[in-house]
Image: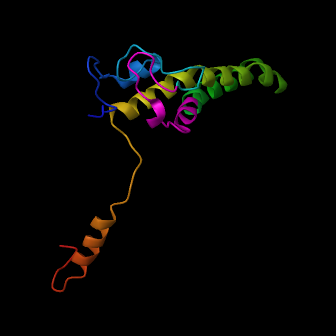
Amino acid sequence: MPQSRYKAEGFTPTDNPMKTGAMGLCPRCQMGHLFSGFLKLAPRCEVCGLDYSFADPADGPAFFAMTIAAVPALAFGVWFQTAFGLPLWVHVFITLPLTVLSCMALLRPLKGWLVCSQFFHKAQEGSIDFDWHAQAKLDSQKPGQNPKS
């Protein structure tokens, strides 16, 4: 019998995908590593063998990292400019690296969280149920029925 990607003998899947993902651990066994590099997902867990090919966080980590880091960085840049009145080129050497480093520090934990959340919620690629849509269209065309009631 094929083994489900969500359950394996002897392993307890995570009940807190945010914590497990931020620590970079496997969502199924919470012992193996999720990453093989700074941001590169490992092909599978070295402990339980979970195949990570289901995971596709896409641009989510970058979006969240930029959103979270941008407000404090902007506040710092505005304060820095108004408090000291420095030339704008100074921001290239202080505010810009601060923003980039803040985003980089957030990318790995956010990516781990999104991958673990996909596992936890059993996320999969969406599909269109053509049979349901065809039946709904037929039902709406039946005479004597008011589809808005």
Residue 140, by quadrant, is: bottom left
* Residue 142 x/y as whole percent: 20, 82
- Looking at the image, which is closer to me, 37 or 79? 37
- As rendered, which of 50 and 59 lies closer to the eye? 50
Which scheme is used to colour this image of the protein?
rainbow
Most frequent secondary structure within the magenta stretch: loop
Quadrant including the N terminus:
top left
Q: Quadrant of residue 73?
A: top right
Q: Is residue 119 magenta?
A: no
Q: Is residue 50 magenta?
A: yes
Q: Position of residue 117 (x, y in %)?
A: 39, 31
In the image, taking residue 37 as reference, residue 93 lies left or right, namely right
**Which image quadrant for residue 120?**
top left
> What is the total number of numbered labels drawn onto the structure image?
0
Residue sitting at the far bottom: 143
Report whether 24 appears left or right of 143: right
Span shown in magenta: 43-65
Residue 14 sits above or below residue 141 on the image:
above
Q: Quadrant of the C terminus?
A: bottom left
Is 70 left, or right, of 92 in this rendering? left
Q: Residue at x 82, y 27 (%)?
A: 88
Residue 134: image location, x then y, percent: 30, 72
Percent of width and height locating residue 53: 47, 34
Residue at 54% from the left image edge and 39% from the top image edge: 58
Residue that appears at 22% across and 76% down: 139
Nearer-the-camera pick, 61 or 57 = 57
Farthest residue in the top direction?
Answer: 31
**Which residue corresponds to the image point at 45% horizontal and 15% vertical from the top-left?**
23
